[in-house]
Amino acid sequence: MLTFDRGRTYSRPDVKERAGLPRAAKGGNWDTGVVEHGGEFVVFANVGTQGRTGHDYGNRWEGDLLRWYHKSGSHLGWDSVQRLLDRDRKVHIFWRSSNSEPFTYAGLAAAVEVADTTPVEVLWSFGGESHSHQVHSSPARAQVDLVASPEQVSQGSYHEGAVTRILVNAYERDRAARQACIEQHGLACAVCEFRFDRRYGELGAGFIHVHHLVPLSELRTDYQVNPVADLRPVCPNCHAMLHRRRPPLSIEELRARLLSD
């Protein structure tokens, strides 16, 4: 297990050394923003400044939470993203506000919000412990209830903001909206008609992703989701393919591509 002191500063060579690698090791994921090592993840985040490649995704502190954006082109269909969001994985996050500075260890992180956008957007918490940071921070958002199972649904209207109502093990997003979508459209993929229960039996019963026909990033913060009109059930493969383009492909476009093969 990797161990670091919270609040202490580390250079990339320092972190490599802690991971049992030569300090001077070059190349590979250690020179990027996300590293998977020994079943754990290390995230290097530039906050309020551009990275070495010139990209500035808008990483920012919101109180004691860090809103962070994955690398360009990332989406929830990536296996590496699914592993990163696995609650049993340890995720170490380092951050800095200038490329000339070492990274500060923010601590072991847990995802409290995940947006199915490209790049993937994650809101990280750090165990409720406070830590100091010098960049401008906006007020922390209200705590989001994590979903233990997509079948745990609530009653009432379905409200989702542009990205703030997406839950971490989201299959996907607001639980009641998801359930209402399935009740209307069923559990078959709207693109390829695959059903998990027919292929995997009891293991696959009730499993499906839910896709927003209008990208979440384009919705107003006060938008009220209509589960029948706005959502469609899709299998993970088709969901990933829908988001291979930005803006996403439509259900009809992807189905036409599938049928043309």
Image: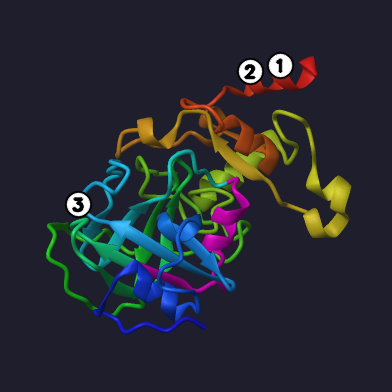
Compared with 219, 92 (above or below) is below
Pointer 1 residue: 256
Asked whether 96 or 61 is in front, the reply is 96
| Crowd band around label 3 with a 10 angstrom C-alpha radius: few (<14), some (14–19), many (20+) | some
**Where does residue 70 sit, x and y in percent of width and height?**
42, 49
Residue at 78%, 32% in the rendered image: 193
Residue at 80%, 42% in the rendered image: 195
**Where does residue 213 sit, x and y in percent of width and height?**
52, 28
Q: Check residue 88 for magenta coloring.
A: yes
**Is 160 situated left or right of 147 in this image?**
left
Residue at disc 3, secondary structure: loop
Residue at disc 1, secondary structure: helix
**Where does residue 181 sit, x and y in percent of width and height?**
60, 39
Residue 50 in view (yes/no): yes
Residue at 39%, 44% in the rendered image: 159
Asked whether 137 or 50 is in front, the reply is 50
Pointer 3 residue: 48
How far is disc 2 from disc 1 in space, using C-alphas? 5 Å
Q: Quadrant of the C terminus?
A: top right
Asked whether 232 or 78 is in front, the reply is 78
**Is 129 situated left or right of 117 in this image?**
left
Compared with 30, 73 (above or below) is above
How far is disc 2 from disc 3 in space, using C-alphas? 38 Å
1 and 3 marks in contact (CB < 8 Å): no
Pointer 2 residue: 253
N-term-proximal mark, 2 vs 3: 3
Q: Nearer the viewer, mark 1 or mark 3?
A: 3
| Crowd band around label 1 with a 10 angstrom C-alpha radius: few (<14), some (14–19), many (20+) | few
